[in-house]
Amino acid sequence: MFYTLLKKEMNELVSSHKLLIVPIVSIILMITYPISIKLLPTLLERELPKGATVDIPMPTAHEIMANVFLNFETMGVLILILISMGTISGERDKAIAPMVLVKPVGRNVYFLSKWFTYSLLASVSFLIGMTITSYYTNYLFEEKLIWEDIALGTLLYLPILLFVITLSIFFSSFVKNSVSGGLLAFVTYLVITKVPQYLHDSLRSISPYNLIQNANQVINGDSYEIMVPLFSTLCLISILLLLGTYVFRKQEI
Amino acid sequence: MIYCKDLVKTFQSSTAVKGINLDINQFGCFGFLGGNGAGKTTTLRMLAGLAKPTSGEIKVAGVDVVKEKDKIANLIGYLPQHPAFFEHMNGKQWMYWVGELFGLSKEVIAERTESLLKDCGIWEARNRKIGEYSGGMKQRLGLAQALINRPKVLILDEPVSALDPVGRYEVLQMISKLKRDMTIFMSSHILEDVEKVADHITVIDKGNILITSSLEELKNRYSYPIITFELLETNHKFLHILNNQEWIETVRINLNEYQVTVRELEIAKKQLPKLITNQNLTLINYRIETASLEDIYLRLVS
């Protein structure tokens, strides 16, 4: 059953070109930062009057990669929400959901097949983007990357992507309008990741934002604490999945 | 096959179904008649397990739709009023995908897909994207896919409303064949079509069932003869005279054409021409008919 639904979701990703668009957009979002940093001095020199000099300290390759994460965090998250926000609400809106759910299809399986598909798309796109960006950063800058740090930092960032997808599909399961669902998912993401940094230390330590920070620190080669934020983020994902499947089961289609 | 007891469905601001009762224990086609907003689609959605009743009991093929939701899908076929599909698929792919959802083997899916698409008249279009299908073709595909699991109960919501006359004829022929081996519960407001295939009729109005009966019994019980005649002149006083006759059940008027449902045909045959002559009116044409399902339905609803 799960495989049959997954097969349909994958075919849909191909026919809607999302399978091509999302990885390309991820690569563009990530790779533009190291390239623009590398080209910045050359571009500024052209603009300056003759004789004037500008001295910009060149960041290390690791600092560049850490910033790539931060850049991806806003635009990347928004794009992931945009591509996944209508996955359930859209099918309900177009009256396809009743055609499917009147068959022997468990609502949990239906929900999870969508979650799995978009999580896979987000993760693979991010991994492709990171691999290409790391390769070019390593090539463009003198100081070389420590690949173990990059790999660990990338892996630590994956739960954040899963969290974004889970939020988006959670709202899509009961908010009838896709755009409203997407907006709610984005606002909730901002609240959950940004607000705790202004709160007490204990709250900050369990926030998914702390996982992003720690992923950055791993890439920078600084000390890090991953267990608590990793555990809390995975807990949040599990709670949202349980709540989402429960709410979806209770919905009238 | 279909059993509902005191079935109620309430939405936030209104009650769509107000305690209906149904008990269908045999194969055949059961027409479910009602106007827009009468509660037909809501009832069918509850039978299919897509909507939860506010109260009451509902069983389809012996399975409690609310308590044993998982079992119901294998026993029914459901065609909504406006069937929708994944438009990137073609007709054949959709049938194969639905067959896989039912856990059928590839051989069975292939065999049933071919026969059902042929029966529904869309075999030629099987490799075309569903996005390119017309409304009628989608309705045919919707019927074909509702039958892939060989259901015991087939629930059809306005199955011929989007079809052209040829399509309607073909689908109704198909329903006539299918009803020998399953229970078909079919909603419609095209009474002429229901009359062609249904053995039993249930009429719903404003969430209440007005009558459940065999078509024959319904006609015997409610089918008064109808005399239709046309006059040259318009005479409002004449309408008043007709309404005061004891042997007349109802009078409907459209311009100068009168449709009179009569209780006693023999009396009417003698009296009506007299009334026309007495009023010095000119009769253009005159015919006696039997009431159609539409006439009975209008009478019941009014």
Image (cartoon, coloured by chain):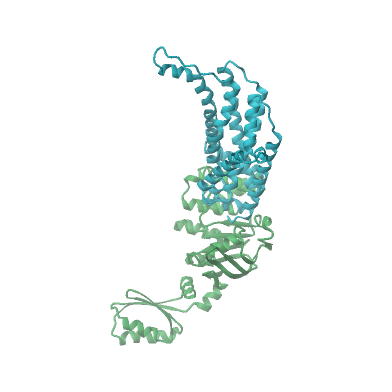
Quarter of the image where the N terminus of chain B is located: bottom right
- Please determine whether, in this image, residue B5 is positioned above or below residue A199: below
Q: Nearer the viewer, residue A101 or B155?
A: A101
Q: Quadrant of residue A146?
A: top right
Q: Which chain is green?
A: B
Which residue is at the far front?
Answer: A200
Q: Nearer the viewer, residue A246 or A204?
A: A204
For the question of whether residue B199 can be seen, the reply is no
Is B225 on the left-hand or right-hand side of B279? right
Judge whether B236 appears above or below B13 on screen.
Answer: below
Percent of width and height locating residue A150: 64, 25
Quarter-of-image position of residue A34:
top right
| Residue A90 spot, x, y in % from top left | 53, 47
- In the rendered image, residue A172, in percent from the top left (x then y), is placed at 57, 47
Q: Which chain is cyan?
A: A
- Residue positioned 55% across, 51% down in the render: A175
For this orientation, the residue located farthest to the right is A227
Which one is nearer the viewer's eye here, B183 or B170? Answer: B183
Query: Is residue B217 visible from the viewing direction of this image?
Result: yes
How many tags in the picture? 0
Establish if A150 lies above or below A80.
above
Residue at 57%, 27% in the rendered image = A67
Horizontally, residue A78 falls left or right of residue B60, namely left
Picture quadrant of residue A143: top right
Percent from the top left, x then y, of residue A192?
60, 42
